[in-house]
Amino acid sequence: MTVHVDRRKLVLPGELLAEGRFEAGPNTYREGDKIYSAVVGLAEIKNKVVSVIALKGCYMPKVGDVVIGVITDYSPTSWQVDINSPYTATLQVVDALPRPIDPAKENIRKYFDVGDVIVGEVIVFDKTRNPMLTTKGKGYGKLTGGRLLEISPTKVPRLIGRRGSMINMIKKELGCQV
């Protein structure tokens, strides 16, 4: 087993990272027993898993992620939500409201309308279908007031900091919810 890069070294696509019995992690690919970088980023090797932290990239949803999105469209039984991902999320009425409604008698736009900003959780996602959200839960639902800041998905770990130190300092100093 041979490692060809130092931890946190800037690597380029196609650059050899390691050889031998390592596992290819995110943003890498394997050819035979060699692992290469698939993107521009910082090399990372932990527990025999070789990965690259991309310097640029898009958000890829995972089940359990809490997301902020904007309602972009609706149908009688669901809303489409832009979560700043290649995938448009779907929020079904049954996953948003505390009680069932009859879509023939009640317009769902009175709950969420196009342009509303919401907080929800990804409850279902695989690459064969778009993410499904829920807004049932403490702190979920429509956001009102405040400011929404956009941060590159690749910068989120830096914003959070080690063991949440940076994000906790921001919350404390600004007195805000993050």
Image: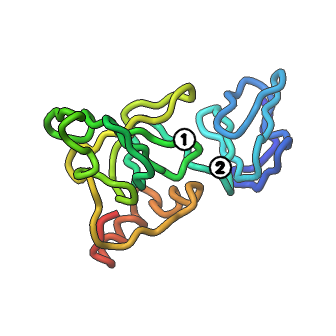
Q: In which quarter of the image is residue 175?
A: bottom left
Q: Nearer the viewer, mark 1 or mark 2?
A: 1
- As drawn, the label of residue 30 is none
* Element marked by disc 2: strand
The three-letter amino acid code for the residue at tag 1 is Tyr
Is 15 or 91 nearer to us in this picture? 91
Residue 168 drawn at (x, y percent):
34, 66
Is 149 or 8 nearer to us in this picture? 149
Q: Which of marks 1 and 2 is nearer the N terminus?
A: 2
- Farthest-out residue, front: 104
Is 110 or 87 nearer to us in this picture? 110
Q: In which quarter of the image is residue 107?
A: top left
Residue 49 vertical position relative to residue 171 in the rendered view, above or below = above
| Residue hosting label 1 | 87
Q: Which residue shows up at 27% across the image and 66% down it?
A: 144
- Which quadrant does the C terminus fall into? bottom left
Q: In this view, does 159 lie to the left or right of 43?
A: left
The type of colouring in the image is rainbow
Q: In this view, does 133 lie to the left or right of 59?
A: left
* Element marked by disc 1: loop
- Farthest-out residue, bottom: 173
Q: In this view, does 50 lie to the left or right of 65?
A: right
| Residue hosting label 2 | 53
Between the C-alphas of marks 1 and 2, the distance is: 21 Å
Residue 81 drawn at (x, y percent):
43, 47
Q: In this view, does 101 lie to the left or right of 57?
A: left
